[in-house]
Image (cartoon, rainbow, N blue to C red):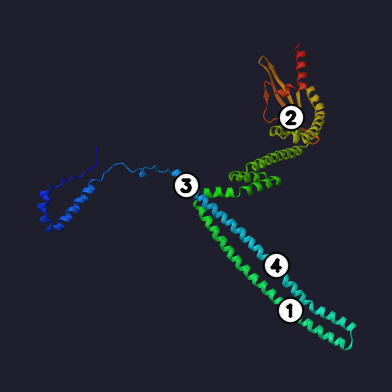
Amino acid sequence: MDSTMTLVCETPTLPTIVAVEESTKENAPELAALEASVAFATLESTTEYSTELPACQIAVAPTLKEIESEIAAAAQQRIEAALRDLNETRARIERERSAREAALKTAQERAGKTRAELDGLAGERTKMELRAQTFLVGDALKDTQAKIHLAFNVRQLELEDALAVAEADVQEMQTQIQAALISDALELQLAEQYLAQLETAAPDVANAVRLTATAQENLTAARQAVSDGLLRDAEILLEKAKAGHADPIQIGEVERMLAVARKNQTARDLIARINTVGNEPGAVRRIRRFIEEAENAGVANLVTHDANRALEAARHAANARYAQARPIADHLASEGFVPVVGDGRIEAWKEISRNSHGTAWTLDRVMLLRGQSWETETPRVPITRRQLPKRVQNSRWFNHHRLEQNVSAQ
């Protein structure tokens, strides 16, 4: 549907215009107003109206994520600038403080030197007078003493004036340093408050900015922590350096250092545990378990030497205990038991029944080596088995017992 509206007005004929000409003189004001209103209506009526929005008003509404990203980018710029200003302010204040302290030290040294020279003036005067008295006599001595007196008085006045100026300079510098300390503290406080205000408004952005700003420092600290053996601290610092997007090459180098340090630490721990085992019963089994743990951790090459040494000593001790246990086991076997010898331990099994369903066995006693003597213990609860444990079946005395049973059966 065409929404264009046009106002059409017919043009009057010539007689009409002549007839009306007389009346227009009388009604000129009214006609002028009428013509103006008609012209305005005609102009307004020829305007086209459309229900479609102009192209400049057609736009896609931004998403909340886009708005949040825009705000975060602005926050990052502001926080980075504030942190940079704070660090520059600290560096400048430190430089100015060092310069003031150096200037004060120079002024104090100058005042001290002048004071020492003034304090020693009397001694110099005395020495010079003694030399004059030694080599001069009469009028020459009197003239020289007068000259010495005048020269030293002038020199004393010069030194006193110089000392007063130097001490005044020191006092002025000390006053300036005190005022500068207050001014610097206030400046730092304002910069820190401004940065804290920005960080409070966007803590996540502030954390990322600080990690980025301190990434290299954290990486350097992580490397030092690895060197000092503080591996847990090194891991935390390395993670912070990664979060701050530190140099990947340097990160990889510190990671390799940390991996090597972890292996060395694991090896040291295993060696320490191996050395604490000693030659007590069960040492061979425990040392073998440590060797297996070292292999799983990939540090067998670092542990093997100490482990083999400890294992050899533990085996010698175990063989000596076995030599002690063997006569006891032979005696038990002669009494009808089936002994099984372990490291510092003898179990005595006894056959209690034999029928078509099989043989039943019970653990009669256990002998344990404590110190240099064997102590016997009896199970509080009877232990019976239809099938002997593998360690018993592998015992040489069990095989001997089976042979005797077979011979008896024949």
What amino acid type is highlighted by mark number 1? Glu
Q: Decide: marks 2, 1 in contact (CB < 8 A)?
A: no
Real-space CA distance between mark 2 and mark 3, rounded to the nearest whole angstrom: 79 Å
Q: Position of residue 191 (x, y in %)?
A: 55, 59
Q: Is residue 25 above or below residue 342?
A: below
Return the residue at label 2: 366
| Residue furthest out toward the bottom | 139
Q: Write the residue at 65% across / 70% down.
A: 173
Q: Write the residue at 75% across / 12% down.
A: 409
Relative horizontal placement of residue 153, taking residue 132 as reference (left or right): left
Return the residue at label 4: 105
| Among numbered discs 3 and 1, the one appearing first in the sequence | 3
| Among numbered discs 2 and 1, the one appearing first in the sequence | 1
Callout 1 secondary element: helix
Which residue is nearer to you in this view: 308 or 52? Answer: 52
Give residue 70's mark.
3
| Among numbered discs 4 and 3, the one appearing first in the sequence | 3
Few, some or many residues within 10 Å of mark 3 (<14, 14–19, 20+): few
- Tag nearer the camera, 2 or 4: 4
What amino acid type is highlighted by mark number 2? Val
Give residue 158's mark.
1
Q: Position of residue 34 (x, y in %)?
A: 17, 53
- Is residue 199 visible in the rendered image? The answer is no
Real-space CA distance between mark 2 and mark 4, rounded to the nearest whole angstrom: 85 Å
| Among numbered discs 1 and 4, the one appearing first in the sequence | 4
Q: Write the residue at 74% across / 74% down.
A: 114
Relative horizontal placement of residue 34, taking residue 172 as reference (left or right): left
Tell me the quadrant of the picture where the N terminus can be found.
Answer: top left
Callout 3 secondary element: helix
Real-space CA distance between mark 4 and mark 3, rounded to the nearest whole angstrom: 52 Å
Real-space CA distance between mark 1 and mark 4, rounded to the nearest whole angstrom: 22 Å
Which residue is nearer to you in this view: 60 or 281? Answer: 60
